[in-house]
Image (cartoon, rainbow, N blue to C red):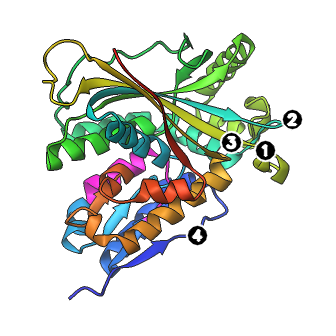
Amino acid sequence: MMPPPWLICVRRPLLSWTVWDQFYGEAVVKACIENGAHFLDISGEPKFLESMYLKYDRQAADNGVYIVGSCGFDSIPADLGVLFTRNSIQGTLTAVESFLSFKSGPEGTCIHDGTWQSAIHGVADQGNLKNLRKKMSLKPLPIVGKKLNRRSAVFYSKEVQQYAIPFLGSDASVVKRTQRYLYENLQETPVQYAAYAAVGGITSVIQLMFAGVLFLLFTKFSFGRKLLIKYPKFFSFGYFSKEGPTQKQIDESSFSITFFGEGYRQGLKTQQGKPNVKICTQISGPEAGYVATPIAMVQAGITILKEPESLPENGGVYTPGAAFSKTKLIDRLSKSGIRFIVLSKIDA
């Protein structure tokens, strides 16, 4: 008989958590499952998250253990933001686009180079991620309502009145896994989703394009990756450094994610006509990496401990949205400084 599951929150090591996960995280997941301990992480690595599902979902279910990845800034705001938007539309949500924005004070912003290293290894490992997804052989989710078209690599967004690019983190893959779970297990309408990041004006776009070309070129070669890792501040125009942000930079920073959704009024068949309801919601909170992330992870852990009856019936490897869709985690986050609000809802 398995011992009663406990919650494990692994302390963040000197390496970035996402980098640490990529190389050492599997051993911790395996040990938790074998010893009956629930596991949460803040990984933003799609390959790690999806490979853990492929390898350990059945074993975790058999042992009654919940393995929940990406419980930090990647990707609780995006994943629960889509669920919040769905719950707020009072009808059927069919598609959502999100726009991530960061604000900083007079001293600007800086991100620890662990996140930079995570991006380097992630881009270099794209081929293995594609092979992993082929191995999973998942059928495409049905498209309900109007198909959500992907935007170009750089575009001007009328919604946020800034230039924007596709968000390169794990949000889109995490949300898609959540929607698959809700559709296949709870027979809920799948929501199409696209994630973008606002980058500001044309000067920021030029800098970003130049840095992006260098980044993609250097990640193709071992020597280039070593240079990127050794000199993060130079290659990122100061956005990443080995020192990370100062306390003042953290105190003056914040984030917001604005969700633009569309769907159908309650009672209307979703296959008839164009979507006729538009909704705009927003999640906002303090500095993303050092303040919002621990808030999200701690509240996710408390939810597992205090609301076991609201979790999926069986253990397994889950996304935050799949694990917590029936819980009060959104309320817990709202009371802890991460706000969920409806900005507008109109008939289209």
Which residue is painted at 23% across and 12% down in the image? 274
For marks 3 and 4 on the same chain, the one whose residue lies earlier in the sequence: 4
Q: Is residue 182 shown left or right of residue 337?
A: left
Which kind of residue does numbered mark 2 sit on? Answer: Pro
- Given residues 237 and 254, the one toward you in this image is 254
Q: Quadrant of residue 129?
A: top left
Mark 3–mark 2 distance (CA, rounded to whole Å): 13 Å
Which kind of residue does numbered mark 3 sit on? Answer: Ser
Q: Are marks 3 and 4 in contact (CB under 8 Å)?
A: no
Which residue lies under the disc numbered 2?
A: 106
Q: Determine if residue 295 is in view.
A: yes
Give the farthest residue toward the right: 106
Which residue lies under the disc numbered 1?
A: 252
Give the residues drawn in magenta, as a range: 40-56
Which kind of residue does numbered mark 4 sit on? Answer: Arg
Camera-nearest label, 2 or 4: 2
Mark 1–mark 4 distance (CA, rounded to whole Å): 25 Å
Mark 2–mark 1 distance (CA, rounded to whole Å): 8 Å
Q: Are marks 3 and 2 in contact (CB under 8 Å)?
A: no
Quadrant where the image shows the C terminus: top left
Answer whether residue 48 is magenta in the image.
yes
Disc 1, SS: loop
Quadrant where the image shows the N terminus: bottom left
Which kind of residue does numbered mark 1 sit on? Answer: Glu
For label 3, the crowd category at 10 Å Cα-Cα, with few meaning under 14, some 14 to 19 and many 20 or more, is many
Q: Are marks 3 and 1 in contact (CB under 8 Å)?
A: no
- Given residues 176 and 347, the one toward you in this image is 347
Residue 11's label in the rendered image is 4
Q: Is residue 53 above or below residue 257?
A: below
Which residue is painted at 60% across and 64% down in the image? 12
